[in-house]
Structure formats: C-alpha cells, structure tokens
Image: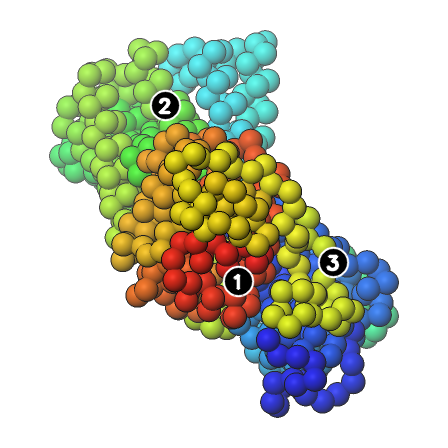
C-alpha cells in the first residue's frame, strides 16, 4: 500500500492538502460500493489528503455527509452506478463517474477532482470548459458510462416505477370484472351502483397513470427533477389520442419516445447560459415550462399526426382483408394485438374486431384469443426459466398471468419495455399462432373483450378451440422468450457486458432489488489516523470490525489439527471459526474443481451444505443464479463473491475456495476469479449483523498482500489463519 510519504509518481504528488468528499453507490449488493469507498480512502491518504466517504448501499445512505462537510470541501467525487442527488453540492467542484472508476482508478479521480467543473444546481455545471473537465468529468446526473449505458439505465428507471401501476391497476380491474362483471353485447359490464364499479374505476386510474409514469421517470433519470414534469405531461399526451385526433393513443412506445425526448431536451436547455439572477428559477420554472410546452406541441402537431395516420390506414387496410382466408386474417390480427399492447396498432385490430361482432363474430373471436397471449406467455416464461428473471420480475410474472386470464394485454408491458428486442417478437409470434388457430377453428367472439374470462362467461362460440388457441399462443410466446433470453446468456437486454477498467456504464437497477445491503460502516476519514505496517489498520476505509458472531457448533468429528488449531480473530477449539463464525473449516476448500461460473456456484453451494445449515442445495443454487443474472458478482482483482438470500439456509453461512486457473466471472476488470467466497443467509436475517461481514470482507480483500497470502496458503488450515486476520 502506498504511503503518504511516497505518493505515486506523477499523480497528485504535489499541491496543497485537500479536504475531499466522496459518494459511492452501486445498484446491487454492497461490495462494489464499499470497494470503491475503500480504494478512494486509501488513495487520498496516500496523497496526504483528508477524505470522508458516504456509502449509499441498498438499505440507504451511511456516513451521510453533513452541511459542514460540504461547506469545507475542496471537491467531491461521486462514483456511482445509480442516481445520486447532487443538489447539496451546488457551488462545489464535482466529479461524477461510474463506480468501477472508483475501484480501479482512485488516484486518477483524486487528481481530476482538483479541476472538476463546479456543479451549478440544475444537473449541469457552471464552468464545464475548465481545464480538466474532460469526458466523465462533468457533474451531470449520470457519472461515467457510455451513451448506451445511460439509455438503458433511463429505460429501466422508467420501467421500475411503472411496474406497480401496471400491477395494481391491472389486478384491480381484473378483480372487479371477476366479482362484479356481467356479460352483455357491449362487453363485460359492471353495474354503476356496484362497489366493484368503484374498484374498477380506481384500477383504471392506475392504468392511466402507467404511461405518464414510464415517460416521466425515463426523463428524470436522464436530466433530474426539471425533466419530470415534461416527461409525465408528454407521456399523458402520448396516451390520449384525442389530443391529436387519433382514436388510439401512442401507448407505451409513445411514452418511451416522449421520455427520452423530454430528458434530452432538458439537458440541452440546461446548456444555455443565462444571467446569474435567472439561474435560481431555471430548474423549477423556466426549464419545466419551456420543455413541457415544446414537447407537448411537438407531439400534438408533429408526432401525433403519424400516429393518427397509422390508426386510420390500418383500419382501412384491415377492412380490405375480410375476404381473405380466416387463418391469414387471424395471423395478421394476432400480430397487431401483440405488437404494442394498447398502442395504435393494438387498438386498430381490437376496434376492427369489435366493429364486426354483429356481422362477422369470427374476427372478434380471433382478437379475443390473441389478447391474453402476451401477459400469459411472459408470465409462463418466468415460471419456466426462473433463473433468467429477478425476484421482482417473477412477481410481475405472476401478476401478468392473472391479468392475462382477464384479457388485460397491458400486463406484458413491463417485460416488453425492459427487453423490447426479445419480448415483442415473442409476443407477436404467440399472438399470430393464437390468431391462426382461432381463425381456422372459426371461434366466435360476441363481446368486445378477450381472455379466458370471456369463454367462462359464455361470450365465446367454440370454447374448446378457443382455449386451444390461447394455449398454443401462450406456449409459443413463453418458449420463444426463454429461447431468446438464453441466447443472450441469461443477461437482460441492454444489461452491460463485462466491464473493463474505467467502464462506468449504468446498470439499470432501477428495476431490480439488490440481494444484500451494507450496514454499520464507520465514517471513513483518511488522513485523520495512521495505518499499521501491513495495511490492516486505519486507512480511512469504510469497513467495519468483525462484531460478535453467533459461533458455529463444534463438531466432535473434526479435530483441532483438521481445523487448523487456533485461528487469529476466529477463536480456537475443535473447529476453528472466522468471520464471526460464519466460515469454518467445513466450508473452506483449497481448490475448486469447476472451470465455469455456473459449475463453480453449484460447487460452492455444496461446500456450504457441509456446514449443516443448507436445507435445499438446488434452491440455494437457483437463487444464486438469479442474483448473478441481475449483475455479476465478480468484483475484479481476481475476486468473486456470489451470494443468496433464501430460506434454503437455516442460518448465515460463508464458504471460500480457490481456483488455480481462475473462473471466468465477467468481472469488472476482466480478470478471472481465483478467490471465490459464497455467502448465503435466510430471508429473515437479511439486514442483521452478518451483512457487516460483506463490508469487512471487501475491505480486507483490497489489500494485495492479504490476497497474496490467501493464494499462497498451503492448506485449509493456513487459509483459515489468513482469513482470521480480518475477523
């Protein structure tokens, strides 16, 4: 570890002692957050600077920077792959980058922070052309990362906020139809004097807000608060076709368009230089009014016209197809129904079928079979290949199944918005298959509605073949979806591939809940205290002391010699324990057999089972795979820490194994994982003392000497002794 007396050559070796602040944050787990914080603290101390690091783990901010801290600061470094509120740093030099930059280039960040642009309070900077304010140095809402990363992060931010509105609105509508609806020639109708009509109206409000929320939070992720209003208003306009003479709105696709337009329009307006006395009102008055007016008028008078044109001409085109074969018409209508799930193409097909109920009920029968396919297919996909989806997506999948049963196509929108290139084609194939089967079987629909509910209520002619059509379409959509996702290696569309050094791209999390969160890290103020000779003490890091452990039960079958006798920091006795007793001789392995990540995770899970705390190895593996699908747990520096939060374990347990050749883990720096830790905790313990082990472990692993000793340890006993150095 470099000392203050011997700073790295050419990097911050001269200049006055600085008072620095930092904020580190990653969207999943805590390891990257704490590793970046530790690296920045160590680098600052090496240069002789003082630094205080605020960590924003997945349970919230810790070591929160005070007003006094900000007032006294010379510069602030924000190393984050999630949204960080910068408003408190107005008037200060702010350098915003991705969290990987904090892990791999802390010295460079400290040097760049000296000349970082001054944050102006509107998401931009007041002197962005200052020397040193190069790429990645601006203090916009998003630090570091490529355009693709920001785009994906913004999209997922919108999707994550939209999902509750889709689920709540859709389920309330479905429940009200099920319990209060009656079949009439006009459709499934709920009496106005029924309480279920009120429930239905509340659900409709949720659905109406869904599209503006998607648009608004896409814009917010791009350009901060000033973009929220134009994004939401633009989304509302997109969803209400009557504002631009269209019987069908632009749907969720229109909302995505308005969200990005609003976000980047606001960013452009922020670049306009204005007099100083105008600057305070720019983010709360001037920018929202200008952006909202410009976007709204642009959509109504420019984009709205093509949407209306699409609706009118599709309707005319469909009118000329009624004489074609029933199967071909079914395929076309099925494709249209499944394409935009409530947008102009979907509405065109639906209204075309509804208008022909009295003359040609077979057309509505085709539509009724295709309508539930997207939500049913996506819901089924989450059940078929659970490891490809996050916990939140699996919950949304169950809700989609319920909505699909009641003919609410919008239940598939969250999946389509998150992975449009894979989900929309799968939906369309399933819709076409369902439409073709229903057309060939001459299924009739007597009400303008779809889904299995209409068949159960007696509003479909040819009920058996109707269910066959729905089943075929659902199966095609589900199988196509999981195939397309599997071809992508299980990674969500748009999710960043392996990060190389300095690639601070955004990861979309908005939508995915982290498995772990850090707690209890003390304030990290480098330079205020020294370090001991081997780098274990002080250093201004954000790790925590080991704390007291519950202690694993001693096993008479393990001798002191087998366990490595006495382990520093870990206790002594029949079975040595380290990391507060969560890791024992039973859960240490000198050499991994596996040569790929999936096999390594399974091997580590079986190793944890030796502790007697794992009730279901397969479930533990599944949860660990699902966590891996949300973002790699390969931390770089040859380290991987897969983890799982599941009731498949009865108590927290940690395992460790080494790999001589290294396992490809898509690590941040591209290195193969040679040191593999696996942590498993029961659901009820997620948030207790054991989480401190993650911060403690991350801090210890930042010491190259510690990593070297782990790699060189001769046997399991020696490994335990090395691990005992950190708790």
Q: CA distance from mark 3 to mark 1?
A: 19 Å
Q: CA distance from mark 1 to mark 2?
A: 51 Å
Numbered label attached to residue 523: 3
Residue 210 at least partly seen: no
Q: Name the N-terminal-most of marks 3 and 1.
A: 3
How far across and down, in percent of the image, does residue 103 sit? Answer: 55, 68
How far across and down, in percent of the image, does residue 644 sit? Answer: 45, 42
Identify the residue at image location x=78%, y=69%: 528
Of residues 28 and 533, the one nearer the viewer is 533
How far across and down, in percent of the image, does residue 349 sit? Answer: 33, 36
CB atoms at circles 2 and 3 under 8 Å apart? Answer: no
Of residues 75 and 461, the one nearer the viewer is 75
Q: What colour scheme was applied to this rendering of the protein? A: rainbow
Indicate the quadrant where residue 634 lies: bottom left
Residue labelled with disc 1: 701
Q: How many marks?
A: 3
Instruction: Give the mark toward the camera: 1 or 2.
Output: 1
Identify the residue at image location x=61%, y=90%: 10
Q: CA distance from mark 2 to mark 3?
A: 52 Å
**Mark 1 Cα within 10 Å, few/some/many (few <14, many 20+)?**
many
Above or below for 444 versus 430: above
Numbered label attached to residue 405: 2
Q: Name the N-terminal-most of marks 1 and 2.
A: 2
CB atoms at circles 3 and 1 under 8 Å apart? Answer: no
**Mark 3 Cα within 10 Å, few/some/many (few <14, many 20+)?**
many
Q: Name the N-terminal-most of marks 2 and 3.
A: 2
């Amino acid at each position: 570890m470099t000392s203050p007396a011997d700073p790295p050559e050419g990097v911050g070796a001269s200049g006055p002692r600085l008072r620095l602040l930092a904020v580190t944050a990653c969207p999943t787990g805590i390891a990257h957050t704490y590793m970046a914080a530790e690296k920045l603290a160590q680098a600052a101390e090496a240069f002789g600077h003082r630094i205080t690091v605020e960590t924003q783990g997945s349970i919230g901010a810790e070591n929160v920077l005070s007003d006094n801290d900000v007032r006294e600061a010379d510069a602030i470094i924000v190393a984050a792959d999630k949204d960080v509120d910068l408003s408190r740093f107005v008037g200060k030099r702010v350098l915003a980058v991705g969290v990987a930059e904090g892990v791999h280039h802390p010295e460079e960040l400290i040097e760049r922070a000296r000349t970082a642009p001054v944050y102006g309070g509107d998401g931009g900077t007041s002197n962005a052309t200052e020397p040193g304010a190069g790429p990645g140095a601006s203090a916009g809402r998003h630090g570091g990362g490529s355009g693709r990363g920001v785009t994906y992060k913004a999209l997922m931010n919108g999707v994550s906020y939209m999902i509750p509105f889709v689920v709540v609105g859709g389920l309330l509508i479905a429940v009200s139809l099920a319990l209060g609806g009656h079949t009439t020639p006009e459709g499934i109708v709920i009496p106005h004097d029924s309480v279920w009509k009120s429930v239905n109206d509340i659900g409709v409000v949720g659905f109406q807000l869904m599209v503006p929320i998607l648009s608004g939070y896409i814009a917010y992720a791009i350009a901060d608060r000033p973009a929220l209003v134009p994004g939401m208003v633009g989304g509302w306009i997109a969803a209400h076709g009557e504002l631009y003479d269209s019987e069908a709105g632009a749907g969720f696709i229109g909302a995505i368009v308005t969200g990005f337009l609003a976000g980047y329009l606001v960013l452009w307006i922020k670049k306009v230089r204005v007099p100083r006395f105008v600057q305070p009102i720019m983010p709360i008055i001037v920018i929202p009014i200008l952006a909202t007016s410009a976007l709204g008028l642009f959509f109504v008078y420019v984009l709205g016209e093509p949407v209306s044109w699409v609706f009118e001409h599709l309707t005319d085109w469909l009118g000329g197809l009624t004489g074609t074969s029933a199967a071909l018409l079914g395929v076309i209508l099925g494709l249209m129904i499944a394409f935009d799930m409530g947008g102009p193409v979907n509405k065109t097909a639906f209204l075309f079928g509804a208008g022909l109920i009295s003359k040609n009920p077979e057309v509505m029968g085709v539509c009724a079979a295709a309508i539930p396919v997207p939500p049913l297919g996506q819901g089924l996909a989450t059940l078929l290949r659970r490891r490809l989806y996050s916990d939140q997506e699996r919950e949304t999948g169950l809700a989609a199944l319920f909505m699909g049963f009641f003919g609410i196509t919008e239940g598939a929108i969250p999946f389509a918005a998150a992975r449009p290139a894979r989900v929309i084609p799968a939906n369309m194939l399933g819709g076409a298959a369902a439409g073709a089967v229903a057309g060939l079987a001459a299924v009739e629909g007597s009400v303008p509605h779809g889904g299995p509910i209409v068949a159960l209520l007696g509003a479909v002619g040819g009920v058996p073949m109707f269910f066959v059509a729905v089943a075929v379409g659902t199966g095609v959509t589900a199988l196509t979806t999981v195939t397309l996702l599997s071809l992508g290696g299980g990674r969500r569309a748009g999710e960043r591939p392996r990060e190389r050094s300095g690639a601070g791209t955004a990861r979309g999390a908005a939508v995915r809940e982290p498995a772990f969160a850090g707690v209890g890290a003390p304030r990290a103020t480098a330079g205020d205290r020294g370090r001991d000779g081997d780098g274990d003490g002080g250093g201004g890091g954000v790790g925590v002391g080991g704390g007291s452990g519950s202690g694993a039960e001693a096993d008479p079958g393990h001798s002191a010699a087998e366990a490595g006798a006495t382990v520093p920091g870990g206790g002594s006795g029949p079975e040595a324990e380290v990391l507060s007793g969560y890791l024992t001789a039973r859960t240490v392995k000198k050499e991994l057999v596996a040569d790929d990540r999936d096999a390594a995770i399974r091997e580590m899970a079986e190793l944890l089972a030796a502790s007697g705390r794992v009730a279901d190895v397969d479930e533990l593996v599944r949860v660990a795979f699902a966590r891996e699908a949300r973002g790699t747990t390969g931390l770089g520096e040859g380290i991987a820490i897969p983890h799982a939060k599941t009731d498949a374990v009865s108590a927290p347990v940690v395992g460790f194994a080494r790999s001589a050749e290294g396992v490809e883990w898509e690590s941040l720096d591209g290195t193969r994982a040679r040191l593999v830790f696996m942590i498993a905790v029961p659901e009820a313990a997620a948030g207790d003392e054991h989480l401190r082990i993650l911060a403690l472990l991350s801090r210890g692993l930042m010491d190259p000497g510690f990593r070297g000793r782990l790699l060189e340890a001769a046997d399991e006993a020696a490994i335990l002794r090395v691990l005992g150095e950190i708790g």
